[in-house]
Amino acid sequence: MSASDFRQIAIRAESGKAERLFRAAVSAFCSLTRPSRREIAQLEDLTLPLFANVSVESRRYVAAALSECEYAPTALVRRLCEEPVDIAAPLLIRSRALSNIDLIALIGRHGLPHARAIARRKDLNPTIAHLIKALEKPTLVSVRQPEAIAKTAPESAEVVVPGPERQQEPGAAAENARRRLRSMMHADAESGGATINPFTGAETYVKLRETALTGNAAFFQTALADALEIEFSTARSLTATQNYTSLLAALRALDLSEDKAFLITVAVYPTEFPHPQAIRIFLDRYRLLRRDAALDRVRGWKAEILSKAIRSTGPVAANADIRKADSDNAAISLKVRRV
């Protein structure tokens, strides 16, 4: 029986069964010494659709269990961290599934309660620690006077002085924190790490959205080809089908959020969403589609393009070699007859 079968059974049955399945699945996963990527994906596929049907106690239990799990599913951890701090605290304090960018985003969305829990993490990034201190005590971050700025280097010479003798300005802490976070995100992007900057890809999304809303298929297909780095003919074939399955994989490969992906899809396939249930089906499909699987689809499209190019150039090259060999043989024969 597949994970989807279990999920449908739990949804149709009483809430108690969903509770037991939710807890049992996570408990069984945490007992695995080194779960495979397939097992991690199966746990996410099973538990995320059940999330809305389980109690606060079950969410708190799962958060505590996954906080000690070295290979916790990232999507489930992030979903739990969006809960109130009394549920998310164990994950905020201990989970290795949360990147620095995740922590920054959580602080931005939930403020001090989440920030105070994050402050208890071991080996917390100094920039994030400074942000939390600035949120708790804004007056600890000072602003230099204009004459001081003229005499010193613009960024590196700024000194944080906690004493009252320095004049403070409202909002100085927030601006200082934003400046540090921007530099931190920039450094993280240059390092090529596994974390994802949530602000990347905004230009690509805007281009796809605007071209999709024009109603001109060629405009959108061109933008999609540019975004995926594929041929225009391939991008055209993705949107020329009767359903949006291929487009779904393309948008998932670009790592668009579900609301952005839906807006683009409904602009390209307006007749596919005549009622709310169709929208729910789209969101379920998009959430369950793994990004690595979508990237595999894109790589397959590119490989197919390359294969076609090789097949088209192969006979031409072979015929050229044959023609060259025939001309060489004719020249040799002519020389022999002359001799």
Image (cartoon, rainbow, N blue to C red):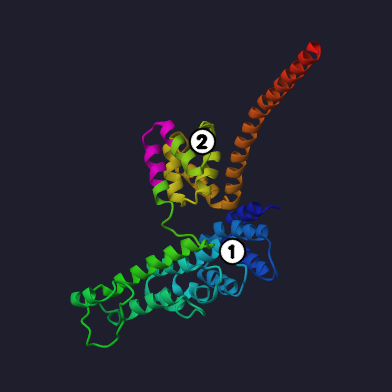
Closer mark to the observer between disc 2 and disc 1:
2
Write down the residue under mark 2: 235
Is 99 situated left or right of 107 in this image?
A: right
2 or 134, nearer to the observer = 134
Residue visible at 68% across and 25% down in the picture: 315
The disc, 2 or 1, on the residue closer to the chain's N-terminal end is 1
Report helix, strand or loop for mark 1.
loop
Residue 82 in sight from this viewpoint: no
Q: Which residue lies furthest to the front in this view?
A: 339
Residue 184 in sight from this viewpoint: yes
- Discs 2, 1 touching: Cβ within 8 Å: no
Q: Residue furthest left?
A: 147
Crowd tier of the residue under label 1, counting other residues whose Cα lies within 10 Å: few below 14, some 14–19, many 20 or above: some
Write down the residue under mark 1: 73
Vertically, is 191 above or below 232? below
**Per the image, is 206 magenta?**
yes
Residue 302, picture quadrant: top right
The x, y position of residue 307, in whole percent, is: 65, 35
Vertically, is 117 above or below 251? below
The x, y position of residue 38, in whole percent, is: 67, 57
Give the amino acid type for the residue marked by disc 2 in the picture.
Answer: Ala
157 or 20, nearer to the observer = 157
Is 232 situated left or right of 39 in this image?
A: left
**Per the image, is 75 magenta?**
no
Give the amino acid type for the residue marked by disc 1 in the picture.
Answer: Pro
Residue visible at 61% across and 47% down in the picture: 296
